[in-house]
Amino acid sequence: MKRIFLTFLLLGSGLMHAQTVNQEIEQENGKTFLLGKINLEGLQSEPYNSWFSSNYSSYAVDETLVKVFKPALDGYHVKLFLGTWCGDSKREVPRFLKILEAANFPMENLDIVALDRRSGKVKTSPTGEERGLNIIRVPTMLFYKNGKEVNRIVESPIETLEEDMAQILNGQSYTPNYATISKTK
């Protein structure tokens, strides 16, 4: 009996901490944005699909550069922080996801977190995935190897997404945009 109770207790606590995927927030002005953990289905739903699909389909991936970093991408985990309300995210995120797809990146190794835009909650998520990561601009794409951050692309690439990824994934020197800005709270 004790074992059954413990099982239910553990399952129940896990469900209480589970977060809704693709949570949508409606602001007082009627505009919506995604918040917290999201997936491709969230980005492909309306009203986000209007910018996601057009930016995804219009982007021509540099296949030559993808071949340069594709072998190095093995074993990486990527965390992508964005704002579905942010112009830079609307431009760069569809491109970034198309590049990962072209590189056959296993999407189970990708975490996508949409951040808040409301006053007092700007660039935060409901379960705090951004805490301690110095997320000051979106999108921010963090590349992890063996559980440690290797580098990141912040807001926009220095050259192109493919060139910046090739530098990061092949261990070359790379300094992201806004590297000297620190978040103050």
Image (cartoon, grey):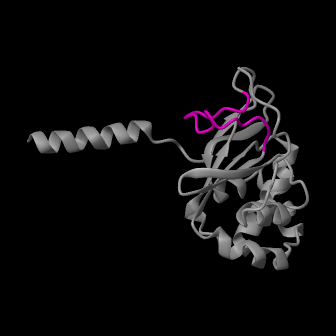
Q: Residue at x 73, y 67 (%)?
A: 170
Is 148 magenta? The answer is no
Report the magenta stretch's main SS: loop
Is residue 11 shown left or right of residue 120?
left
Q: Which residues are magenta?
A: 122-138
Residue placed at 80% from the left, 38% from the top? 137
Q: Picture coordinates of residue 107 (x, y %)?
A: 60, 65
Q: How many marks?
A: 0
From the top left corner, tell me how far across and down residue 146 is, in percent.
Answer: 53, 57
> Is 125 in the magenta?
yes
Q: Quadrant of residue 179?
A: top right
Along the line of sight, the residue nearer the viewer: 70 or 100:
70
**Quarter holding the N terminus?**
top left
- Who's the residue at 83% across and 46% down the image? 155
In the image, residue 69 lies at what x, y percent? 74, 72
Q: Which of the 4 quarters of the picture holds residue 135?
A: top right
Residue 128: x %, y % from top left: 58, 34
Which quadrant, please, contains the C terminus?
A: top right
